[in-house]
Amino acid sequence: MLEVKNLHVQVDDKEILKGMDITVAPGEVHSIMGPNGSGKSTLAQVLAGKEAYEVTEGEVTFQGKDLLDLEPEERACEGIFLAFQYPVEIPGVANTYLLREALNAKREYRDEKPLKHVEFAKLAREKMKTLGIDEDLLKRSVNAGFSGGEKKRNEIFQMQILEPALAVLDETDSGLDIDALKIVANGVNSMRDSGRSFIVITHYQRLLNYIVPDFVHVMVDGKIVRSGGKELAHELEEKGYAEF
Amino acid sequence: MSVDLEKLAQEEYKYGFVTDVEQEVAPKGLSEDTIRMISSKKNEPEWLLEWRLGAYESWKKMKEPRWAFLRYPEIDFNDISYYAAPKSNPSPKSLDEIDPEIKETYDKLGIPLEEQKMLAGVAVDAVFDSVSVFTTFKEKLAEEGVIFCSISEAVEEYPDLVRKYLGSVVPRGDNFYAALNSAVFTDGSFVYIPKGVRCPMELSTYFRINAENTGQFERTLIIAEEGSYVSYLEGCTAPQRDENQLHAAVVELVAHNDSTIKYSTIQNWYPGDKQGKGGIYNFVTKRGRCVGRGSRISWTQVETGSAITWKYPSCVLEGDNSVGEFYSVALTNRRQQADTGTKMVHVGKNTSSTIISKGISAGEGQNIYRGLVEIGKNAEKARNYTQCDSMLIGDRCGAHTFPYIEVRNSTAHMEHEASTSKIGEDQMFYCRQRGLSAEDAVSLIVNGFCKEVFKELPFEFAVEAEKLLSVSLEGSVG
């Protein structure tokens, strides 16, 4: 699914990723943990194609394609989804409108017919129920005036509609209370299948009680310093990152 | 990494074609003779000729205003032709009598003149250069007592109404361009809504400039009697030419007791090319008088065209409890410049006004909001809310705001909000991460920014406005 090899990335001449490697097979859930400033969010942004990040070395292959060659929207259409740590507000644009445009852009990319209003509404209503999102949130402007929890739930809702092959969750758990955390985790778990992969970036082991990963990686100073199974998260919770 | 949008920027202005039709064009230049010629072409009564000549006298003494934040070369008013009309049947009684070329022009513009092909519920007056070529649904409107015709026809058929109201809102010597218009105006629309009538359809005028080296000087007059309602929309396009062309219109609105006039504009005159060559100079005076108590005038404009826009649709709130509104989206791309805004003059008690202005600058465009809110000494408890938002796309464009507030009554309540934002990289990235192309993302974000204004447009046209904005933005990112 995804193969990142020796990835070096800099922003404003400062190197942030210093030889990052990770391989994600279809159906796997990988968690990346690490202290602040270790480069976790940078990795997420680079995978999604943020322009401010300059790749100086290394390669990224996604489903056999050179990912670094693609525009952000092409990556999205190829099946990469980023649940943003800080989802932006877009005043005046209805949440549903953006989402329908996005879904139809993706469908067009795959030579599928665009979904009609009615079909989209039906799809949206189904997904809304499972995430406990009310209709009002769909009509409101994208993320404008949303609470922290609503923003994060909205990201998961978008993910459910867009059905990506690889979803990168960038600290989706931060700022969530336990109920919201469960809703978000359920949203992710309900999508897990043999063909879909996840990269879950988090500071806390707490989320991983609900989204149980296949692999846990520890990231420090721009690269992965240790990898293991889900038990590694518990160890980190106890000992912290001091030993790295 | 960035998207190659250069070729989109080259995209031709969609309405830039020229109609090949035999036209009668007056020789260039402005003199008393020109004015007499126009007046006699239109079989005008003596009083109107005198009125025009008086305006010409005032105009000769005036100086071209240069206070606007606009840069353009001096206009040679003797290098313009003041009258151009298709030679074919000047007053067709039915569609069959219209020159097929002209009919086809309107078809191409998406304004079919056959009533059965029209958007349901919209009546159209089609103005081609200096003359109105056709007005649809006249009979149907007449059943309700609504008069909708060209101003030339109104002068002949309803001289008393025209004489009573012409110049009653914008006096013939009001300003340089209004005086010029009063001297040489050729055609435009006339609307009269009788007492208590809610106009059963949207009225609209479609202005088309076709002839070369010709100015268009249209004049529109709308009168709403007590308790009536009308929604009116104008659209404008012009061929793509290297020379600048002048368009100097005057629009007058009169709202009597408890009546409402909604006036919407979708202005898409040829904006000039990327280098700033060609394009329409749009110098327009639009003003409405809320003479009656409880009357209401609402201006909504979407300005995406023209090389130069100089335009301040205004409301004079004379009647107690009258309401004035101004909703504006102005977009400047390439080398376009727009100096636009409004004047809200509060005279009566409990009058209120709302101003919502959205300026979008892209390319090397310059966008200026200029507005005046004036509260007179007798305007007890007047209220105004002003919101001016500017959005910048790229780093070569500019946005400027010049709000003027004059308050002479201490009971007034004024609110003013202003913001300037750069189209956010983060917003763009968010949309693109979801799968939208860069240009779709810009258009989505800008349309969201303009939402408050678009919702004021008649439903049929709100969709058009969104499309127009997207087309005008093409090539603005890259």
Image (tube, helix red, strand yellow):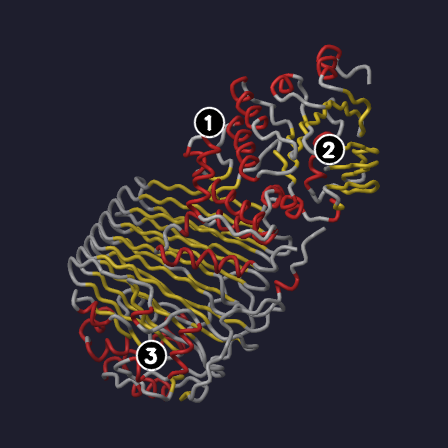
The residue to which callout 3 is attached is B133
Tag of residue A25: 2
Left or right of residue B67, residue A49 in this image: right
Residue closest to the eye, B390 or B373 = B390
Give, as a three-letter code, the residue at label 1.
Answer: Gly
Tag 3's secondary structure? strand
Instruction: Using the rendered image, report if marks 2 and 1 lie on a common chain.
Output: yes
Q: Residue at x 22, y 73 (%)?
A: B163
Q: Position of residue B331 (x, y in %)?
A: 51, 58
Q: Earlier in the sequence, mark 2 or mark 1?
A: 2
Give, as a three-letter code, the residue at label 3.
Answer: Val
Left or right of residue B31, residue A239 in this image: right
Marks 2 and 1, how far apart at CA: 31 Å
Instruction: Using the rendered image, report if marks 1 and 3 lie on a common chain.
Output: no
Rendering quarter of residue A24: top right
The residue to which callout 1 is attached is A132
Q: Is residue B5 above or below residue B141?
A: above
Could you tell me if the residues under marks 1 and 3 are in contact, i.e. CB atoms within 8 Å?
no
Chain for numbered disc 2: A
Q: Position of residue B58 (x, y in %)?
A: 36, 75
Give, as a three-letter code, the residue at label 2.
Answer: Ala
Tag 1's secondary structure? loop
Residue B56 visible in the current orientation: no
Q: Is residue B331 above or below residue A198?
A: below
Foreground mark, 2 or 1, reads: 2
Residue B162 visible in the current orientation: yes
Q: Mark 3 Cα within 10 Å, few/some/many (few <14, many 20+)?
A: many
Chain for numbered disc 1: A
Marks 3 and 2, how far apart at CA: 69 Å
Chain for numbered disc 3: B
Tag of residue B220: none
Residue closest to the eye, B149 or B219 = B149
